[in-house]
């Protein structure tokens, strides 16, 4: 009976954090200030509060300065943009992130555009996304970058492989497709209007599931030996699960990421890495 091998995001992320921490200690030894990451949380979404807490803890562990701005759910777009503008001018802030989701009445596109491209650590500013599409050096969105790092760490070759990305969000699906294409994979992006989805997933050598539907991907949708990456996370009565039916798909996949302990830790590690790189760009 096949049992898929684990792409261990938790262990890989720990190694990345240790490397980042060493860089920060070196900066301190040279009498330089530490990188600063500002996170904006609007409202009291329970999951977002957990994520922000994890990011703040990760910052402290590697020696970053963490700036948390928790705004009430009643905050309007202009108020949020005003705060982002002040952080753009703050020399102690090298990276800015607006935690999603934000209230529907806030114009997310305007908020993203209000962040200076050089302080965008989530890779969602239109300028940075445009560079990504053009294959130019830019800040890469954290989750897709973390997945590509996992592939390299485990020696997974993407060149010539057929990859299916489930989901077309600006944060995961679209940039994930771009990075896979840049790594010479042949990519299909699927979404809620895709016809005959299972035919496409059964042809894939690599599947990235990022649609937010608990345990959507089943073994019957996956060909033997496929590499499966689960970006989703949902809380059910028995605990946290992803977009992949882990027990079922593990019987046919060659590699798989767990939930939790897979993509999540890599996303946070790449947020730190992006912030460190922004720091060196800004400070010189």
Image (tube, helix red, strand yellow):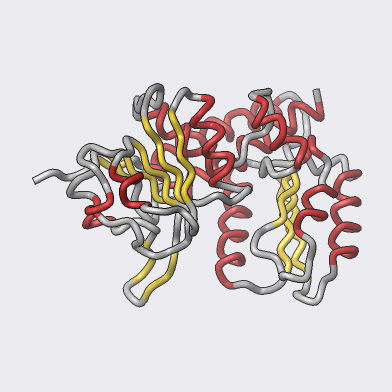
Q: Is residue 17 visible?
A: no
Toward the viewer: 122 or 178?
Answer: 178
Residue extending farthest to the front is 195
Total numbered labels: 0
Question: Residue 108 or 220: which is nearer the viewer?
Answer: 220
Q: Is residue 54 left or right of residue 281?
A: left
Give the side of residue 13 with respect to residue 249, left or right.
right
Q: Work out whether residue 277 can be spotted.
A: yes
Question: Residue 250, percent across and down?
Answer: 22, 49
Identity of the residue drawn at 75% across and 51% down:
38
Task: Name the spot of residue 263 as percent of width and height, x first.
Answer: 45, 47
The image quadrant where one finds the C terminus is top right
When the figure is inspected, residue 242 is found, relative to residue 72, above or below; the finding is above
Q: Residue furthest left?
A: 1
- Which residue is drawn at the image coordinates 85% and 53% (left, top)? 84
174 w.r.t. 152: above or below: below
> Which quarter of the figure has residue 216?
bottom left
Relative height, residue 132 to residue 252 (above, below): above
The picture quadrant where one finds residue 260 is: bottom left
Q: Position of residue 34 (x, y in %)?
A: 73, 37
């Amino acid at each position: 009976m096949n049992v898929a091998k684990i792409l261990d995001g938790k262990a890989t992320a720990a190694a990345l954090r240790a490397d980042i921490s060493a860089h920060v200690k070196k900066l301190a030894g040279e009498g330089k200030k530490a990188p600063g990451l500002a996170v904006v949380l609007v409202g009291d979404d329970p999951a977002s509060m957990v994520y922000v807490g994890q990011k703040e803890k990760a910052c402290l562990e590697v020696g970053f300065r963490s700036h948390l701005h928790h705004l009430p759910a009643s905050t309007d777009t202009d108020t949020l943009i005003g705060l982002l503008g002040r952080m753009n001018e703050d020399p102690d802030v090298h990276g800015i992130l607006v935690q999603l989701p934000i209230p529907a009445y806030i114009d997310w596109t305007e908020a993203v555009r209000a962040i200076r491209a050089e302080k965008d650590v989530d890779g969602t500013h239109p300028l940075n996304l445009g560079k990504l599409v053009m294959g130019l050096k830019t800040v890469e969105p954290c989750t897709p970058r973390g997945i590509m790092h996992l592939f390299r760490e485990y020696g997974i070759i993407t060149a010539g492989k057929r990859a299916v990305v489930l989901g077309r969000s600006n944060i995961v699906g679209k940039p994930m497709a771009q990075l896979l294409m840049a790594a010479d994979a042949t990519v299909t992006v699927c979404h809620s209007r895709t016809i005959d989805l299972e035919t496409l997933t059964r042809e894939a050598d690599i599947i990235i599931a990022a649609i937010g539907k608990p345990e959507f991907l089943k073994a019957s949708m996956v060909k033997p030996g496929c590499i499966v990456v689960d970006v989703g996370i949902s809380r059910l009565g028995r605990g946290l699960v992803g977009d992949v039916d882990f027990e079922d798909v593990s019987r046919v996949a060659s590699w798989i990421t767990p939930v939790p302990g897979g993509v999540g830790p890599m996303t946070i590690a790449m947020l730190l890495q992006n912030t460190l790189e922004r720091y060196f760009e800004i400070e010189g």
